[in-house]
Amino acid sequence: MFHKRLFIPGPVEVRPEMLLALARPQLGHRSQEWKDIYKGICEKLQKLLKTQQTVMLYTSSSSGAWETAVRQGSLKKILCTTCGAFSERWQQTAELNGIPHDTLAFDWGKGVKTDEIDKALATGQYDAVTYVLNETSTGIRNPIEDVCALLKSKYPDVFIMVDAVSAMAGEDIPVDDLGIDMIFAGLQKCFGLPAGLAVVMISDRFFERAKEAKTPGFYFNALKLKGNHDKNQTLTTPSIPQAFALDAQLDDMFVEGLENRYKRHAEMAAVVQAWAKEHFAMFSEEGYYSKTVSCIENTKGVSIADINKELARHNAMISNGYGKLKETCFRIAHMADTQIWEILGILALIERILGFKKWV
């Protein structure tokens, strides 16, 4: 069986060391050994996110955290900001849960503008904003620093609930300094692990608001989850193998150094984006480029499917455009444990497949 080296924005390539960590023998999820592991993981995640607030694990994809957010993060109406496929799912989650909301939509490939959020919040209709820090479908990195500063200065009672699925562990997110009320990510992107757990930070004031939620649900009920978390347990049986791997990966992140890790991500992004401008064009709006995945406009009209067929012959894979961007764009991920030399290699391989350079 030939393994394709993944340069897609999730699931990402997983190092052999992490695959070995997944293979540790199981243990009882109510045992003291598990409680010690769980407590240690959550403390490491607090360090990663620079927060004293509660950080817990969900045995679900990050989508589960959307349910917690919309069901329990608003008592009035939510302002859902959208700029691509995944930010639009915030709106869909609110709609399907029957939660009052309005959508502030921006075109795919454009960033979410803070001044437009300001105008919407000035109406006084909303007590929460949903926000995607890094829109995986379009390679947009939204200016979370600006919107958090806006809320602090003008709308301190409005919560901000952040999808950081393809950003967390790939860039610095100082949660407490920013004043984020809820933020979450899955393991299958910048954490460099298989899917199966979500990392979720929930603020103290979010828990207070959750007490008044009329339909909090069960599996994603913040207060039920917190009650077990405070005992170093999970509400239901967790995905123990992923927790073993997360524990090991966090240790490795601190050995690398978080600043070094974030610098590596920024450097890889710069390489890919410069290459994209040389040979194609960036689909994402200038000034809003992601630090973890580049969405590149297919200005040459090449077949992305055919490129991937050829890449498969060399045991590699990139990502087609997402949804309506299929074949009109393609995406190259530069996240997790990927190194710059690997990025240079995949770019050189694409150049040779397309005839930009001859084989040597």
Image (tube, rainbow, N blue to C red):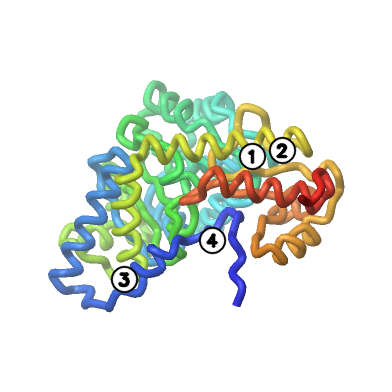
Q: Amino acid at mark 3?
A: Ile
Mark 2 neighbour class, 10 Å CA radius: few under 14, some 14 to 19, many 20 or more: many
How many angstroms separate mark 4 from mark 3 (CA)? 19 Å
How many angstroms separate mark 1 from mark 2 (CA)? 6 Å
Q: Secondary structure at mark 3?
A: helix
Q: Earlier in the sequence, mark 4 or mark 3?
A: 4
Does any portion of residue 87 appear in the rendered image? Answer: no
Q: Which residue is mark 3?
A: 240
Q: Are marks 1 and 2 in contact (CB under 8 Å)?
A: yes
How many angstroms separate mark 2 from mark 3 (CA)? 40 Å
Closer to the eye: label 4 or 1: 1
Residue 272 badge:
1
Q: Secondary structure at mark 1?
A: helix
Q: Earlier in the sequence, mark 4 or mark 1?
A: 4
Residue occupying image coordinates x 49% and y 43%: 130
Q: Amino acid at mark 2?
A: Ala
Q: Secondary structure at mark 2?
A: helix
Q: Is residue 224 left or right of residue 140?
A: left
Relative image position of residue 34 (x, y in whole percent): 20, 68
Relative image position of residue 274 (x, y in whole percent): 67, 33
Residue occupying image coordinates x 35% and y 47%: 253
Q: Are marks 4 and 2 in contact (CB under 8 Å)?
A: no
Q: Which residue is mark 4?
A: 11
Residue 209 badge:
none
Q: 14 or 356: nearer the eye?
A: 356
Q: Is residue 292 left or right of residue 178?
A: right
Relative image position of residue 206 (x, y in whole percent): 31, 45
Mark 1 neighbour class, 10 Å CA radius: few under 14, some 14 to 19, many 20 or more: many
Q: Earlier in the sequence, mark 4 or mark 2?
A: 4
Q: Which residue is mark 2?
A: 276
Residue occupying image coordinates x 33% and y 48%: 201
Q: Is residue 110 left or right of residue 30?
A: right
